Amino acid sequence: MDTVPRIRAARWADKDHVTELIADALHPSPLATWLIPDPGPRHRILTDVLGIWVEHAMFYGDIHLTDDATAATVGFHRYRPIPPPANYPTRLGDAAGPHSDRFDLLDRLLANERPNEPHYDLAFLAVRPSARRSGHGTSLLNHHRSRLDHVNLMSWTSTTPNAQSLHVQHGYTPGSAIQLPDGPVICSMRRNPLHGDIQPTRTTATESQTSLQP
């Protein structure tokens, strides 16, 4: 039987590790291949772009890790509009180079699907490939669900078709499918508040990000 991991909030010192973890999980996916067709710089570019969003989550969201640091969630508190990362177009260009257009297109397509009402945006659920089938993804989603139910908040996410069933088990319902040009399908999903009415918590950035889950 798998041991249920302890889950903790990430600290500033964890951000580089979380970035590498998500890059490792996303790297073999069709989405990563679509974003960066050239396999040579793929991992480096993913890491550099993801680092922008992980850092942004430290200010406008939250990050949670399993105690063995092999799985993580990254989310944004979209209780009200939040700004993009500082100097994002320049930083994206520096990080992704000629692949920036595809990252920008993905960002815009996801933004078009994102709800207008206050919600929690689960941007990433990532498990290191060596820890797959350990139950860590389920544990993180259980923790995520408990936190949302405590504040009675709607959640939205985007994921791959392979991960849809896991999210359905945790109360998410499928929404629109996003077909990337000559690329994979991205699935939007939402989880409604436990009691119907959204009551967003008043959480500051110190108490506690777009891209997509692998």
Image (cartoon, rainbow, N blue to C red):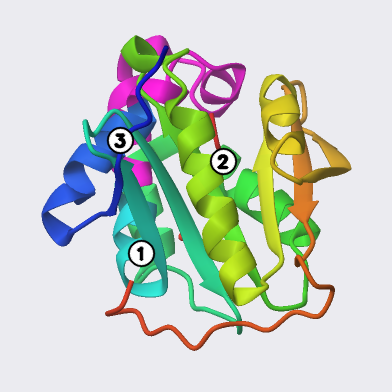
**Mark 1 vs mark 2: which is more N-terminal?**
1
Q: Residue at x 76, y 21 (%)?
A: 182
Q: Give residue 147's position: percent from left, percent from top.
A: 52, 62
Q: Which residue in the structure is indicated by mark 2?
A: 212
Visible residue check, residue 136: yes
Q: Give residue 177's position: percent from left, percent from top.
A: 85, 37
Q: Residue at x 73, y 34 (%)?
A: 169
- Left or right of residue 30, residue 12 in this image: left
Q: Write the start and end of the magenta stretch as one range.
A: 24-50
Q: Quadrant of residue 65?
A: top left
* Secondary element type, mark 1: helix
Q: Give residue 49's position: percent from left, percent from top.
A: 37, 44
Residue 58 sits inside the magenta stretch = no
Q: Residue at x 77, y 36 (%)?
A: 168
Q: Are marks 3 and 1 in contact (CB under 8 Å)?
A: no
Q: Nearer the viewer, residue 64 or 145?
A: 145
Where 70 sits versus 192, above or below? above
Amino acid tagged 2 = Leu
* Secondary element type, mark 2: loop
Q: Which residue in the structure is indicated by mark 1?
A: 56
- Left or right of residue 177, residue 78 in this image: left
Label 3 crowd (10 A; few <14 / some 14-19 / many >=20): many
Which residue ends up furthest to the front in the rendered image?
A: 1
Q: Nearer the viewer, mark 3 or mark 2?
A: 2
* Secondary element type, mark 3: helix
**Mark 3 vs mark 2: which is more N-terminal?**
3
Which residue ends up furthest to the left in the rendered image?
A: 13
- Distance from Cα at disc 3 to Cα at disc 1: 14 Å
Where 205 sits versus 62, above or below? below
Amino acid tagged 3 = Thr
**Mark 3 vs mark 1: which is more N-terminal?**
3
Q: Which residue in the structure is indicated by mark 3?
A: 47
